[in-house]
Image: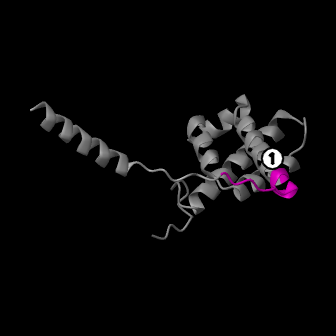
């Protein structure tokens, strides 16, 4: 009986060792292009600038006046492509620094409108009725 049990265990162990994967994973090291690093850093910087812009109190009020929750606007910005975020960051660069509160509020409302329009055109949302939603 014991011999039969040992034979079963031996066959089981041999079979299980045959199932093991002994392939070796090779590490692959390559040079990274400087332009690629600069581009990635700029994209991260643009996205963080837009997100920090959405954290401002006056911008959140403008977003809520458009009928969108600030958390939803942040989710929409996170879903944007790098090119779309870059367009928004360029629009933010054109906004006047400092300035009066009304100008900043209008700029923030314009930025929110552009974000909502881009997400509406890409099909992520259906906020504006004048955007043709093709299915």
The residue indicated by pointer 1 is: 41
Answer with left or right where residue 89 lies relative to residue 63: right
Indicate the position of residue 44 as horizontal and vertical percent values: 75, 45
Check the image and tell me how it is coloured: one colour
Q: Is residue 47 magenta?
A: no
Indicate the position of residue 16 as horizontal and vertical percent values: 32, 45
Find the residue positioned furthest to the front: 3
Let me know if residue 74 appears in the view: yes
Q: Which residues are magenta?
A: 27-38
Indicate the position of residue 32 as horizontal and vertical percent values: 81, 55
Answer with left or right where residue 128 lies relative to residue 100: left
Q: Nearer the viewer, residue 105 or 75?
A: 75
Q: If the image is split into quadrants, where does the C terminus sit? A: bottom left
Q: Is residue 33 magenta?
A: yes
Q: Nearer the viewer, residue 40 or 59?
A: 40
Give me the residue at 85% from left, 51% from top.
38
């Amino acid at each position: 009986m014991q011999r039969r049990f040992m034979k079963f265990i031996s066959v089981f162990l041999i079979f299980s060792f045959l199932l093991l994967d002994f392939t070796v994973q090779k590490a692959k090291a390559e040079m990274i292009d400087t332009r690629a690093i600069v581009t990635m850093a700029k994209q991260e910087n643009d996205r963080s600038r837009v997100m920090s812009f959405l954290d401002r109190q006056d911008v959140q009020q403008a977003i809520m006046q458009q009928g969108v929750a600030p958390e939803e606007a942040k989710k929409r910005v996170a879903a944007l492509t790098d090119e779309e975020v870059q367009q928004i960051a360029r629009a933010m660069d054109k906004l006047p620094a400092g300035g009066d509160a009304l100008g900043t509020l209008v700029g923030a409302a314009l930025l929110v409108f552009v974000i909502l329009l881009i997400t509406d055109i890409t099909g992520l949302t259906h906020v504006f009725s004048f955007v043709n939603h093709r299915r």
